[in-house]
Image: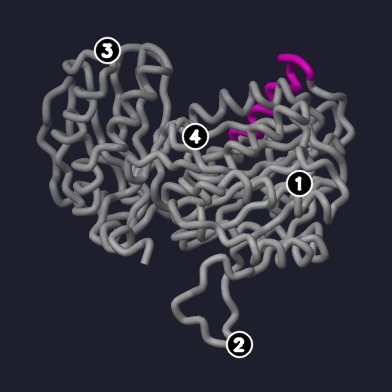
Amino acid sequence: MDNKFTYIDGGICAAKGFKASGTYCGIKRPANDTPGVKHKNDICLFVSDVVCNTAAVYTQNKVKGAPIIVTKDNLEKSDNKAIAVIANSKNANTCNADGVEKAKRMCELVANELNIPQEQVVVASTGVIGLTLPIEPVEKAVPILVNGLEYGKNEEAATAIMTTDTVKKEYAVEFEIDGFTCHLGGMAKGSGMIHPNMATTLNFITTDCAVSSKMLQKALSEIVKVTYNCLSIDGDTSTNDMVSLMANGLAGNKEITDECESFEIFKSALYEVMANLTRMLAKDGEGATKLVMCEVSGAKDKETAIICAKSVICSPLVKTAMFGADANCGRIMGALGYSGADIDPLKIDVSYQSVSGSVDVCKGGYVVDFNEEKAKKILLDDEITIKVNLNEGNCGITAYGCDLTYDYVKINGDYRT
């Protein structure tokens, strides 16, 4: 980690002035609905003590969930100001005729309970697409969520947005700007239907650093390209993807309104959080047994590096090779070759790396002799890096993904039922 930043606990509550809560409301009844059994949270709320400058990025899928439509409209009406975020799991509220109506109703419920403008509420949903969202459980849950708001309840919120996730995903850092201690933290959900095409999954980030809405948007749009947009689990871009970033300014620093040294520090802190959340999302891919990263170096520009790294990480043949611990670098070269990037195949070097060591498998575009047993040992580890050197420049990037296993098919074969 960059020594400018210190990892801290707290997720979305790490920043001053952010409270959270979560509860189970029964949006989707579990198969084993036994009386007295404690169910996992399926809805959450987090709120700032003061109005926040807010930025967001959304899925590029032309089919968009109703919450995306409503949130975009709210932020446009409020001049990119928000105070509260309500999010649910188990139902995406997408492809429903009454979806927008119900997403607006969720905002209205929160606004009424908190006595704030409805347009200052961000709404998000994740889960099954095409199921009508029952609003009655939400109506009962919102007063409970508001009454349960506390500064330390970030975990309640982080678990409420999980669907097929096996672990909650949170990360936060502390840093200094102009002598003021600032905090920035976030939470994410996502395990499947994840492909780099804007935001990938639901992600919420909060900070007490004072930053204008314009500069928040600039920072978020830049960092998403080299973090969430360099993540792929299965090649499917969700309808509900969203990242929101809220800044309440309670750290006390002078508001960042232009590209200055303070902005670069803030942007680095944002990258630290988003990159670590991206890594967590990749490692928890549906059915995954391994975190697989493709580290491209020697590119003539960043765009070339991104195209190449994403092509490798998205390849089903590469992903299955990683599952089987098969050091077939022909699949790597094939993915680089069809990526569309302007590269010279005869300059490419490829190696595999893990805690067990490193092995070169390709030099100058040609396979080299290597120790198959050593390569197998490396690829059997649960975190693997495919290192690709294009040898054409000084730019690089890392893309994040996972192996493709039998369990991925099992999970998605009966996801709805």
- If the image is split into quadrants, where does the C terminus sit? bottom left
Asked whether residue 258 is drawn in magenta, I would say yes
Q: Secondary structure at mark 4?
A: loop
For disc 1, the marked residue is: 84
Q: CA distance from mark 1 to mark 2?
A: 31 Å
Q: CA distance from mark 3 to mark 2?
A: 61 Å
Name the image quarter holding residue 267. top right
Classify 10 Å Cα crowding around label 1: few (below 14), some (14-19), many (20 and above).
many
Q: Earlier in the sequence, mark 1 or mark 3?
A: 1
> Horizontally, is 332 left or right of 4 in the view?
left
For disc 2, the marked residue is: 36
Residue 69's tag is none
Magenta residues span 257-271
Does the CB distance between marks 4 and 2 fall below 8 Å? no
- If the image is split into quadrants, where does the N terminus sit? top right
Name the image quarter holding residue 318. top left
Of all residues shown, which one is farthest toward the bottom? 35
Query: Is 223 located above or below residue 286 in the figure?
Result: above
